[in-house]
Image (cartoon, helix red, strand yellow):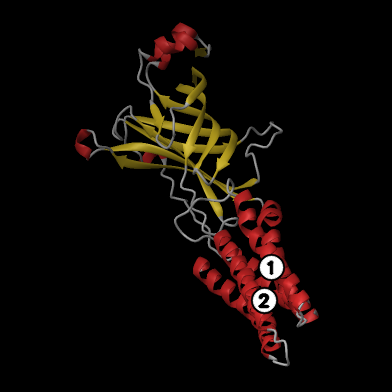
Amino acid sequence: MKKFLLLFLGLFLITFSLSFAAQKADHSSEKLEISDINTEHLVQTKILYDEIYDIDISEGHYRASVEVLLAWEDPKTEDFLARFGDEIIHGEKLDEYLHEIWYPEFFISNAETPRTPHYKTLDVLDGKFELFERFDAELSIDAEMPKYPFGNLDLFLDIASFSGNKQKMVFYPESIEIGHHDAHHKVVKGNWEVEKTILEEEGRTSLNHGGHEKFSYLIAHVNVTHGFLDALQKILFPIFSIVFLSLLINHVFSWDTFDMYNWRIGAQLTLFLTIPALKFSLAGELPTTHYLNFTDALFIWATFVVTFNLIMGIISLYRIPSEGDKSGRSLGRFAKISSPLATILVIGLLLSYIFA
């Protein structure tokens, strides 16, 4: 029994260590100096996430409440100060004034529906216009997590300009923040933790203007990882418990009597039915992928182990002789030895495929 427990513990540790072996994606890019950017309007941009919630990797989207601050130089700031002084304008007054000046217009290219603005303001600070907007948006993402529940998920926000090409305006990434420093609430809802944030700009061509001119895009990346304790209690512990119980049933209840084999088959059948029930209960939390991910591999592994032990039990039951034939007992001993070996072999093959 000690050897059996040590074998299973070693298998768990190997699986667990391999799950952390993957290299994490790096979206970092070299940031240009302001003096190196040649454009008519350089728009310095800050982004702050007030809330990130409803992260749904099975459907590939999430929701966010975001604050955006756009600052740019313009000679008409003097006109603004003459008319409004140090007032921060909003509402109808803001809408009317924006018709008189140039300002950076944008849309969210990965939004599933148009963003919902809460409020928008304009003022002048240090000789620059500052346009502030807070909005809610439902954003689509590439929910690629081949090592789920491990690995990281990129919650990105793709802001596209349409006030002109890069000769007219360029977003300059200033900063990205997760929550206000004096706020005392969890910004990212659910069992997710922020690993790192990146704000970057890139130029992309569009179908208009002959498809040759580039427009400025600002991309905010919030890389999050799934909470380990949540993954442990919802996925890892149940699956490893099923495999452990299946092997334990083979190891302990191996006497060559009809009653013991009937009990053994019934127990393995119960575990076999538990596996799809567990996966069904997690359906809303598992990523829908076109490839085999780590969690899929664990479910396949558990299904194989239980199916193998169930088949061995059925065959052994019907080969227990009524008069002195030892073939049933030999098959039972074979199953007792081969089942742990097959368990290690299959999980090894699956992990090598996932983490290769």
Asked whether the residues under the numbered discs 2 and 1 touch, taking CB atoms below 8 Å apart as contact, a structural biologist would say yes
Q: Amino acid at mark 1?
A: Gln
| Mark 1 neighbour class, 10 Å CA radius: few under 14, some 14 to 19, many 20 or more | many
Question: Can residue 217 be seen here?
Answer: yes
Quadrant location of residue 22?
bottom right
Using residue 51 as the reference point, say whether residue 256 is left or right of it.
right
Answer whether residue 81 is visible to the viewer in this image: no
The amino acid type of the residue labelled 2 equals: Gly
Identify which residue, 343 or 83, lies in the foreground.
Answer: 343
| Residue in the foreground of this view, choosing between 339 and 159 | 339
Residue 119 placement (x, y as % from top left): 52, 19
* Quarter in which the N terminus is drawn: bottom right
Residue depicted at x 24% and y 38% = 213
Mark sitting earlier along the chain (2/1): 1
As displayed, is residue 121 above or below residue 315? above
Q: CA distance from mark 2 to mark 1?
A: 9 Å
Compared across the picture, whether 138 is left or right of 307 comes to left
- Residue 313's label in the rendered image is 2
Label 2 crowd (10 A; few <14 / some 14-19 / many >=20) = many
- Picture disc at residue 268: 1
- Which residue corresponds to the image point at 49% horizontal and 49% vertical from the top-left? 143
Position above or below: 144 against 333? above
Residue 164: mark = none
Q: Quadrant of residue 41?
A: top left
Total marks in image: 2
Q: Residue at x 68, y 53 (%)?
A: 234
Compare residues 334 and 185 and report the one nearer the observer.
334
Q: At 49% from the left edge and 54% from the top edge, which residue is drawn? A: 26
Q: Is residue 204 left or right of residue 304?
A: left
Q: Looking at the picture, does residue 323 appear above or below residue 37?
A: below
Which image quadrant is residue 103 in? Answer: top left
